[in-house]
Image (cartoon, grey):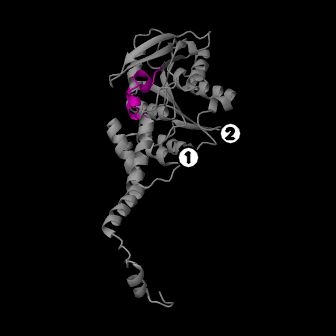
Amino acid sequence: MRPGATWAEKVGREGYEMTTPRPIRWRQFVPKAVFAILTTMVILPIALGWGLISALTRSPCTSAVAPERLDADVQAITIRFRSRAGLTHDGIYIPSENGAVVIIAPPLGGSAPTSIPTAELLARHGYGVLLYDARCCADPSSLITLGRGEADDLVDAMSVLEDRPEVDPDRIGALGFSSAGAAVIMAAAAEPRLRAIVVEGSYRRLVDALYNDMWFTALMRAGTWLSYRLDTGYTLDDVSPMDVIGEIAPRPILLIYGSEESALPQGRSLLELAGENAELWVVPGAHHGDYLSVAPDEFESRVIGFLDRALLGTD
């Protein structure tokens, strides 16, 4: 082949085949691109919100109530009651020496490490204490509602005290931490037999707790709303202590929050909504749930002093 031959000559003399680039098949590319965009911008945020709620409502039982968890010098009896949700709750009752009883509502996952020390503290001052299993401990297949259904459980637990001769029915209070605190507020608003409540680190609304430390898109919020609705039968708006805390007055309320916990602004909001019957103690240096361990002496002084005034009528 002579130098300088054209491409056509090469093709003709050396057997080259002429080819043309294959066109992009947009009909195949566009659906894949649209699916990827929808997955990233729509499906994934909804799934994240859905997964968050599912993890909370299906929290496993981490610590069931048991008498052997108490100090040896604290005498307790086992109790059992059936709630309106159809669950059988086991628990323990420390008999009252002064006629007053404090019901400690179970937090997420069951009896938190703070519940037993608080119960022992109350017992040392003569208070009766009732602790019972959370829903997930009573039945592993039961779903947690993060406050709404648990408020009904607390009221149902009061049936254990009805036939106790040492219990003054006008001297029954309740204490709850975090989601159990929300349950205590909503239970007290509905049940006038609860004469005083202590609330630790609760949220004013469940949606505020869910979205407090995260950036949630509207679709992530939709995922949480749908998941909670389908799991529990309630809506997120049904778990709103701020809407009912004003109905507890004139019964006294003690709100306890740590200076280092993110829920403190919600505690201040609850204080304003509750009225003059409420007081707020901000524990310096405390985070969510470690109020007793950070300030044991002042915790004892403030909580026992509050209950003495509210339930016993003494300073």
Residue 242 visible in the current orientation: no
Q: Is residue 284 magenta?
A: no
Q: Nearer the viewer, mark 1 or mark 2?
A: 2
Residue 89's place in the image compared with 262, above or below, is above
Task: Tell me the residue at 64%/29% (across/down).
Answer: 292
Q: Residues within 10 Å of mark 2 (few under 14, many from 20)?
A: few
Q: Circle 2 sits in a helix, a strand or a loop, which is it?
A: loop
Can you give x and y, in whole percent of width and height, for residue 65 in the image? 50, 18
Rendered view: 222 above or below 235: below
**Looking at the picture, which amino acid does disc 1 mark?**
Pro
Q: In the displayed structure, would residue 208 be above or below residue 302? A: below
| Nearest to the observer: residue 26 or residue 278 | 26
Residue 262: percent from the left, percent from the top?
A: 57, 45
How many marks are shown on the rendered structure? 2
> Which stretch is magenta?
132-152
268 or 169: nearer the viewer: 268
Amino acid on which the number 2 mark rests in the picture? Gly
- Give the residue number, with chain letter if any, for mark 1: 265
The residue at which mark 2 appears reads as 285
Residue 87's disc number: none
Q: Which image quadrant: the C terminus? A: top right
